[in-house]
Structure formats: C-alpha cells, structure tokens
Image (spheres, rainbow, N blue to C red):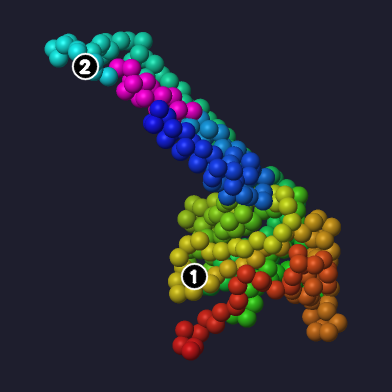
Amino acid sequence: MKRVGKVAALAGFVALLATGCSGDEVLRFGWPAGVTEQAAKMRWLWTWSVLAALAVGVIVWGLIFWSAAFHRKKKNADPTELPRQFQYNVPLELFCVVLPLVMVCVLFFFTATTESQVLDKKPNPDVTVGVVAFQWNWEFDYPKEPKDANGQMIKTIGSSTEIPLLVLPVGKTVQYNLRSTDVIHSFWVPEFNFKRDVFPNPEKNNQDSSFQNTIDQTGSLVGRCAEHCGTYHSMMTFEVRALPADLYARYIQLRTQVNPATGVPNTAAEALASLNCGQLCTPHAVTTEPFNTDRTAR
C-alpha cells in the first residue's frame, strides 16, 4: 500500500504540473509555434510521431513490468528449472521483425510526404523576394513589383545604422530567392520553423537557393543568420513585418512614390510610418540595435 501511495502521489504531482500547459502546448510536445502553413504541416508530423512513439513506449514498458511482476523467480522454485524458452518461436520472431519494419515504413512515408509539401513550389508565387546576405547584414528586393519613381527595383539594404525590415503579405505565397555575396550565411526566421543556407554561386554548388511559404498571421518577427559567418555574425539580424494583403499593397505603392521631404522614393521605414497601422507598422527594428562594423572602434 505504501508503494501504491507513492505512485499515486507522483502521478498527482505530474498532473498538477501539467495543468500549467494549455491544450495546444501539450499537443505540440515542445514543438515551437509557427506562423506559416508549412510550419503547421511539420507540427502535425511531429505530434503524431510523438504519439506513436509514446504508444510503443507504453506497450514496451507494460511488457517489462508485466514480466517483472508475474515472471519473477519463485521463492521455492527449483534452481535447476529453466523458464519457458522462446528462441524457436517463429510467429514471435516474425512479429518482432515485421512490426518494426512496418512502423519504420509508415514513419518514412509521412516524413517524405510532409517534406515534399514543405519544399513544394508553386509555378507562379504571389510575391517574390530576393534575399542577399553579406557580411554582416541583409538586402531585400522585390523584382516582380513595380519600379520606384527612379525606375529602380524596390529594395531595402541593412547598414551599420539600420536594421533591415522585410515586409511581407499574409495569406499569399511568397518565394524567397537566396544568394550570398561573400561567405555562407543562413536565412532563418524561427517562427517559420524553417531555415536555409545562403551560398555564394548556389548554382555552382548544386544548392536549391529558393523556397516558398505562406504566412497565416500578422505580426513582427525576428530573423537571424544561423551560420557562423565571421566577427559580427551574432549581430546579423533583420525583422519581418507580416501585413494584411491590402496594407502590403499600399506599402508597395508608397515605396514607388517620392517622399516630398527628401525628394527620393520612400524607404521601408518611411512607407511603414505612412501606413499608420500601430505597432505592426513600427518603422524601425525593436528587437536589436544597429552596430558599428569598424573593428577598431572603441
């Protein structure tokens, strides 16, 4: 009874701690929350994989405890008597080989199909973004959007005085074309649950330098370089502004227009400020500050 009481107390303690998690958090099993359709597909793969693993674990643990509880050596047992032998039990051996094989095949199938869905590319994405990585910042351009008042491509370039903002629409298929001008970097937005290395000359390195996703909620997200690329790697950040489709269209329109105060086309910060849509349109990065790339600066 003491042992049963201890087990019951432990189960109650675990149940009490588990109440601190929401239902959604419990079903994620530690998988980070994502903001894209592709992230949702990966989350479901993770959830069902963990549930399957837990089911197998429960069965194995049950068999172990059952064997330990009901097949222990008896006090008055004959020491020369061997337990029942199963080494030539063909059905049992087939079961132990076929069942794991089936489990591996099922897991492989769903992993491969999910990977195919995540990496799938539509022939005509709604928005195409060029992502250029360089030591130690980012450049974002929109090659398929209208040109600005000077006939130049709309682009945002990070510098020692500005953290670049990547503005994207919600509910649209976005294609990211990645390339580096120097060393290997990595384009990573944690809430995308996806990252991809950015290579110089990706064609020569046989690298797939593009991917697509669809953001399904508005917000401000932090982007980082996830490949060590030199002295200021840790400072190589950017921010994503995910806007409703109508605000994104207005943003692009503002980027093509000339700012009367400066006489040049609106920057990303100026266009966002003109949208006047609250915190979502904050014109400057709020998660980090620009850094001085002068290595001799004190």
Task: Tell me which corner region of the image, top left, top right, bottom left or bottom right, holds residue 241.
Answer: bottom right
The residue carrying mark 1 is 233
Instruction: Using the image, determine if residue 85 lies above or below residue 186.
Output: above
Per the image, label 2 sits on a secondary structure element best described as loop
Which residue type does callout 2 highlight? Lys
Pointer 1: residues within 10 angstroms few (<14), some, or many (20+)?
A: some
Residue 272 in the image: x percent, y percent? 78, 70
At horizontal 49% and vertical 70% (from top left) the residue drawn is 233
Residue 31 is a magenta residue = no
Residue 107 in the image: x percent, y percent? 50, 31
Q: Give the number of the disc on residue 75.
A: 2
Per the image, label 1 sits on a secondary structure element best described as helix
Instruction: Using the image, determine if residue 93 lies above or below residue 260.
Output: above
Residue 35 in the image: x percent, y percent? 67, 51
Q: Is residue 214 left or right of residue 42?
A: right
Q: Residue furthest left?
A: 80
At horizontal 83% and vertical 77% (from top left) the residue drawn is 258
Task: Kindly report the distance in space between the C-alpha atoms of the residues bearing marks 2 and 1.
Answer: 67 Å
Which residue type does callout 1 highlight? His
Which quarter shows the N terminus?
A: top left
Task: Tell me which corner region of the image, top left, top right, bottom left or bottom right, holds residue 271.
Answer: bottom right
Q: Is residue 201 visible?
A: no
Q: Earlier in the sequence, mark 2 or mark 1?
A: 2
Q: Is residue 53 left or right of residue 258?
A: left
Q: Is residue 66 visible?
A: yes
Residue 56 is a magenta residue = yes
Q: Which residues are magenta?
A: 55-71
Instruction: Using the image, determine if residue 265 lies above or below residue 220.
Output: below
Q: Nearer the viewer, residue 186 or 203?
A: 186
